[in-house]
Amino acid sequence: MQQPLKICNPLLLELLKCWLPAHESFHVMQRSIPFTCADICMSLGLSVVGLDVDFDKTLCGIVGGLLQDKIVTVETVIEIIQGLVGSDSNEVDNVFRLYIFVCFAVLYFSRNSKTISNIPCSVLDDIDGLSNYNWGKAVHSFLVKSLSRRILALGQRELCLSGAAPVLQICGEWRLREEDKQNNMIREALQLGDEAKSEKSHVDIKLASTKVLLQRLRTHRTRLRMMKDEMTLMRKEISLRCHGGIDTGVQHG
């Protein structure tokens, strides 16, 4: 991405309406599109292997000690980080711990409340061991639970989705078909460039750059391959119907 992602609320609302909790997938255009840990991995680059992440109901460990007797909000944690950075003491590890803690609260495990609670905390004691955990699964599970809760609240004036909601918008890009990418709202939400172009738009071959010609050639090859596959399926279906004496296109009186 070349710029910060702009959240498209209408798109997220439509995705929420299409959510199938029992299958953890979206029902779009007669298709069931699964939402898996792989989508988290592709969107955020998080690992999908390792130990399960435990969510601590109360602040504990080293981070809990740093935030003791404080109302824990994102602003409070940032102020503590700034204080540690400005001090003469060597608090690099604690600054890192609190920074990751803020990332948890804002990006991965965000909630509707202003105060931070029920978040991975004890795992930050060993910052060298953070790579041993399955963060992709943790983010995915948290977001799936939020989707399944919020679908029950459809119809209310306001809907607040917890977790890494922008992932739903990001992962949609590689889940879309070519015709889906022609939808202007989807293009704007996923920052796919200018307004969708008609497939019949003419390109002057003599004036077009080599890069444009190669791109169009690859696109046409893909379309031809898809058409050939579809034609093969149609031939097989026609052959089966002819040999079986079945013709579903004819109405009998």
Image (tube, rainbow, N blue to C red):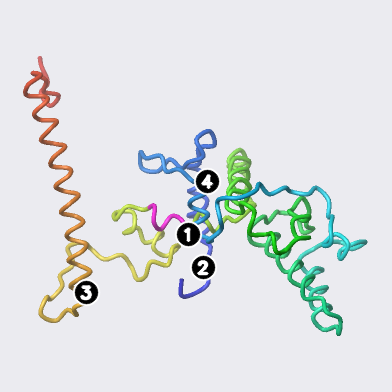
Residue ID for mark 4 = 16
Between residues 109 and 100, which one lies in front from this camera angle?
100
Q: Which of marks 4 and 2 is nearer the N terminus?
A: 2
Which residue is found at the position 82% from the left and 68% from the top?
Answer: 76
| x, y percent for residue 92 | 77, 76
Return the mark for residue 5: 2
Q: Which of marks 1 and 4 is nearer the N terminus?
A: 4
Residue ID for mark 3 = 212
From the viewer's perspective, tell me whether residue 225 is left or right of residue 145: left
| x, y percent for residue 77 | 80, 68
Magenta span? 170-175
Circle 3 packing at 10 Å, graded few (<14), some (14-19), many (20+), is: few
Q: Which amino acid does label 3 sit on?
A: Val
Q: Is the residue under label 3 in contact with that under label 4 (CB below 8 Å)?
A: no
Q: Earlier in the sequence, mark 3 or mark 1?
A: 1
Return the mark for residue 179: none
Quadrant of the drawing holding the C terminus: top left
Return the mark for residue 170: 1
Element assignment for label 4: helix
Q: What residue type is labelled 4?
A: Leu
| x, y percent for residue 174 | 39, 56
Circle 2 packing at 10 Å, graded few (<14), some (14-19), many (20+), is: few
Q: Earlier in the sequence, mark 1 or mark 2?
A: 2
Q: Which amino acid does label 2 sit on?
A: Leu
